[in-house]
Amino acid sequence: MGTGRATAEDTGAGATGEVGAASSLLSATAAATAAAVGAAEAVRTAGPADRSAEVAVLAALRARPLRFPFTHDSLRCWAYLAGGAVLGLVTAVLLLALTALGLGLSVVGVGLPLLLAVALSGLPAAALERRLLRLVEPAPVPDPHRALPGAGRPARLRTRLRERATWRELAHTLLVAPPLTAAGLGLTALLLFSATLVVSPVVVQVLAPETVMLIPGHAVPGPLHALPFTAVGLAGLYLGGHAGALLTTAHVRLARLLLGPREEDPGGQVLELTRSRARLADAFEAERRRIERDLHDGAQQQLVALTMTLGLAAHELREGAGAGDGDAGAGALALVDRARGEARQALEQLRGLVRGIHPQVLTDHGLAAAVAEVALRHPVPVEVDLDLPGRLPGPVETTAYFTVTEALTNAAKHSGATAVTVHGRVADGRLVLQVTDDGCGGADPAAGTGLQGLADRVAILRGRLMVTSPTGGPTGLRLEVPCSG
């Protein structure tokens, strides 16, 4: 046999996005605010695609409507809008250039790849928008596309072209992002103009005796005459803070609508399937713990009581045999001793069964202690090197424990190994566990050794299980699982 390999990859789901006189400042700001409110309301009524979670910026605005322009949330909104405006401009220039070149060269067939690049341009643009949204939204917008581990470039391209999310992202890039980018640029310009008006008295003082005109055709004689413009600038900054929050809310809602997964998408179905598998695994684990508890507290205690009762009966029979009727007493005593031995054997088997279902030492003392106990009882010498920073999440400990026990069982039954090593560390938030034996190798994960079931269990935790077992050995099993549980 060659190399057997069972692998469970992540099935998760991942981020990007996107001027006048003093007398027109307040009206322009109000118009931008109204446009943002209208966009937000349009998305709010869009139906099931809208996510139920409230936008963080809108929640902050509702909680502190008067103080919001002076908070860090307002600064994050302006940073997001400025970054989105720059991104939108760059994206628009690139798409126009690609489209023009593609159409111009399509007559000779060279432009078709360029037009295909335009069709797929929503993928990187949406990824950047989801990442940029993290400035204002703590909960990330998930990547709606299916994970394609190991797929080649042609297969990946065909899959992306068939996914609805690809075309929603293109629609967001071509139809939704431009007006939002224009609104963001307008609000950014109003912010800068308002900031200029705020410091206008200083500007007039510094440039004196030069003529300064904040309104075309009207010179400002001195710093005191510029104070009304300072008031207008402060009002513009204050209203601009609210307008930025509302425009950011529209961005977030539209991103959730067009850039996030939907239930009809294969990615959303895979995500829900993964969640249902995780719920089933949790229910199975709870049921197994209940069975272990019932056996430990019920049948095991009854067998202990039976053993004690048989011991008392044997004691009484020995005293009776000493008083007389030796043959009958000796026969009964032999039967009681035999029953007592069988009860002890059943008790040991039951204790082994309880440990196999869920060892109490794993619950009480953690993975390192549980693996050390298994190593002491293993028929093949096992060297354990587990250096863990305390307790790990329960599902991670349980999965790692049964992975080790399955590997040790296979080493004892099938490999003919004379030594086994168990090495484990936590690195970059992941438990990395390696079990190696010096046996004959040739392990096949598909041959019913229990490795495929372990790989399925690890996949639920978004981890990976790899088995390498060339003919002649050695056999190595490597487990990687996130410690987030």
Image (cartoon, rainbow, N blue to C red):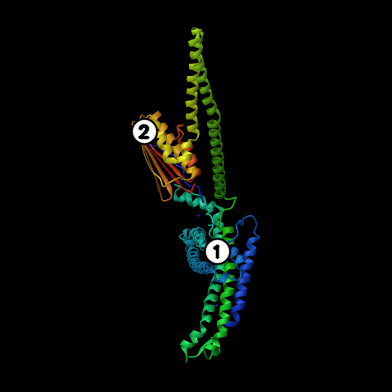
Q: Is residue 353 above or below residue 239?
A: above
Q: Position of residue 109 (x, y in %)?
A: 47, 59
Q: Secondary structure at mark 1?
A: helix
Mark 1 vs mark 2, foreground winner is 2
Q: CA distance from mark 1 to mark 2?
A: 56 Å
Residue topped by disc 2 = 441
Q: Nearer the viewer, residue 66 or 40?
A: 66
- Tag 2 or tag 1, which sits nearer the N-term? 1
Depth check: give the residue in front, 459 or 120. Answer: 459
Name the element at disc 2. loop
Quick one: label 1, few (<14), some, or many (20+) residues within 10 Å?
some
The answer to whether residue 26 is left or right of residue 450 is: right
Label 2 crowd bin: few (<14), some (14–19), many (20+), radius 10 Å: many
Report which residue position mark 1 lands on: 174
Q: Is residue 485 above or below residue 169?
A: above
| Marks 1 & 2, CB-CB < 8 Å contact | no
Q: Amino acid type of disc 2?
A: Gly
Task: Check the image and report above or below for 437 versus 273.
Answer: above
Q: Give the percent coordinates (x, y) of residue 185.
A: 53, 72
Q: Quadrant of the N terminus?
A: top left
